[in-house]
Amino acid sequence: MKKEYSIVRRDERSDWAEVPTISVDSILWEPDCGVRANGQFCYDEENLYVHLWAIEEHIRAEYTAPLSPVHKDSCLEFFFMPTEGDRYFNFEINPNGCLHIGFGYDRKNRAVLVRRDAMELFQIKTARTPDGWEVFYRIPLAFLRIFYPDFTFSGSIHANVYKCGDETVKAHYLSWNPVTSEQPDFHRPEDFGVIKFT
């Protein structure tokens, strides 16, 4: 059964404590090693705001350059597509704020997107926490409209949220909405849940 989450509208003064949390709690493909993750989303007229965090003892953060395979590090990921779309975005970020973005139909048929102004455009901020790490970023509506000109923050999107670390001390894979593949594979829009704009 597909999970659902409602994104709340907020203004600049709102507190993240007021934003509903989702649990990235489906443990996949490897034994449970104690890593956990959560997420929050909200929006205003111009941006979708993302806050993801991990409870993780052994943090790996090696990559810093564009196009790096950040999924090998400790990594938090947000995949999504408009309800009427057939292509999806994947935003993958490690604790260094190194961002990997892709856009396409599936794992093989997609383009990697490189923005020289990524840190400024998406306002990526990462931090270590007492029990792990977190990331905050925004996704501008203007950026999304390059790919979907009629997109608005209304209705719903199909999405999933992931935590992984292919080359961490203990490899792990977690998702918000369960993934039905027998092998590690997050590029499965058929397993996305539903996020509704309220």
Image (cartoon, helix red, strand yellow):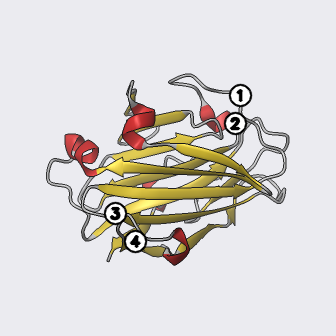
Q: Nearer the viewer, mark 3 or mark 2?
A: 2
Marks 4 and 2, the one that precedes in the sequence:
4
Q: Please, what is the three-letter code of the amino acid marked with disc 1?
A: Glu
Marks 1 and 4, the one that precedes in the sequence:
4
What residue is shown at x 47% (from left), y 44% (from top)? Answer: 91
**Viewer-proximal residue among 43 and 90:** 43
Residue 106 in picture, x, y percent from top left: 41, 42
Residue underneath mark 4? 7
Q: Please, what is the three-letter code of the amino acid marked with disc 4?
A: Ile
Residue 185 in picture, x, y percent from top left: 58, 46
Q: Residues within 10 Å of mark 1 (few under 14, many from 20)?
A: some
User: What number is the disc on residue 62?
Assistant: 1
Query: Horizontal placement of 187 versus 133: left or right?
Result: left
Question: Circle 2 — which element?
Answer: loop
Query: Horizontal placement of 148 versus 59: left or right?
Result: left
Marks 1 and 3, the one that precedes in the sequence:
1
Q: Quadrant of residue 155?
A: bottom left
Residue 147 visible, this angle = yes
What residue is shown at x 60% (from left), y 45% (from top)? Answer: 126
Residue 78 in picture, x, y percent from top left: 49, 52
Marks 3 and 2, the one that precedes in the sequence:
2
When the figure is inspected, residue 35 is found, relative to residue 91, above or below; the finding is below
What residue is shown at x 50% (from left), y 34% (from top)? Answer: 100
CB under 8 Å between discs 1 and 2: yes
CB under 8 Å between discs 1 and 3: no
Cα separation between marks 3 and 2: 27 Å
Cα separation between marks 3 and 4: 10 Å
